[in-house]
Image (cartoon, rainbow, N blue to C red):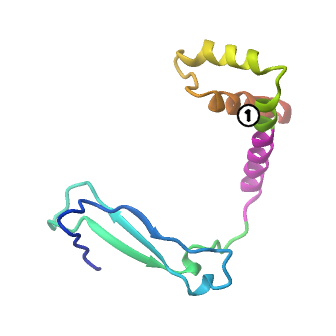
């Protein structure tokens, strides 16, 4: 395993440093560089930083989506469209804002109007589809 040491001015690096452009015709030739920083105690002092290099084959899915995954994707798509329409509906915007403010400070209340609309539209989708 490789060991990573950063310059004194850089404390930690975590996340994707470069990504693969999957739409590019040269995607097969590209590499993704991923850096991780482990905060937990380790036996070897200074071995908490790692860098991984991955090609397209390690990022591309190899199996077909299951029926459950397709169902979840369908729900997400339908709820996203409903939220977009509801945010633009001028007839209901004042009631949505009033209902949002009423539940905002309650336990389990949504803290943003967008999250509140996702909950409302998601609940409506579940009621309509018997979930």
Is residue 78 in the magenta section? Answer: yes
The spot of residue 40 in percent (x, y) is 24, 54
Residue visible at 68% across and 13% down? Answer: 98
In the displayed structure, 8 sits above or below 29; it is: above
Quadrant holding the N terminus: bottom left
Dominant secondary structure of the residues highlighted in magenta in the image: helix
Is 124 in front, or is 64? 124
**Residue 17 lies in what quarter of the image?**
bottom left
- Crowding at dot 1, Cα within 10 Å, few <14 / some 14-19 / many 20+, comes out as some
**Residue 30 lies in what quarter of the image?**
bottom right
The spot of residue 14 in percent (x, y) is 36, 61
Is 66 in front, or is 11? 11
In the displayed structure, 104 sits above or below 41; it is: above
Is 55 on the left or on the right of 90, as rendered?
A: left
In the displayed structure, 91 sits above or below 125; it is: above
Residue visible at 31% across and 61% down? Answer: 37
The spot of residue 25 in percent (x, y) is 68, 84
Q: Indicate the secondary structure of the residue bearing disc 1.
A: helix
Asked whether the viewer can see residue 51, the reply is yes
In the displayed structure, 108 sits above or below 56; it is: above
Asked whether the viewer can see residue 131, the reply is no
**Residue 34 lies in what quarter of the image?**
bottom left
The spot of residue 71 in percent (x, y) is 77, 50
Is residue 88 in the magenta section? Answer: no
Magenta segment boundaries in residue numbering: 65-81
Q: Which residue is mark 1?
A: 122
Quadrant holding the C terminus: top right
């Amino acid at each position: 395993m490789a060991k990573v040491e950063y310059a004194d001015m850089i404390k930690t690096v975590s996340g994707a440093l470069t990504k693969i452009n999957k739409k590019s015709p040269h995607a097969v030739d590209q590499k993704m560089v991923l850096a991780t920083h482990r905060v937990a105690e380790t036996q070897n002092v200074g071995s908490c930083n790692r860098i991984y290099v991955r090609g397209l084959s390690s990022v591309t899915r190899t199996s077909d989506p299951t029926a459950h995954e397709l169902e979840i994707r369908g729900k997400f798509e339908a709820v996203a469209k409903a939220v977009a329409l509801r945010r633009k509906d001028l007839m209901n915007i004042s009631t949505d804002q009033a209902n949002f403010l009423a539940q905002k400070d309650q336990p389990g209340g949504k803290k943003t109007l967008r999250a509140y609309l996702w909950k409302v539209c998601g609940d409506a989708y579940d009621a309509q589809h018997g979930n």
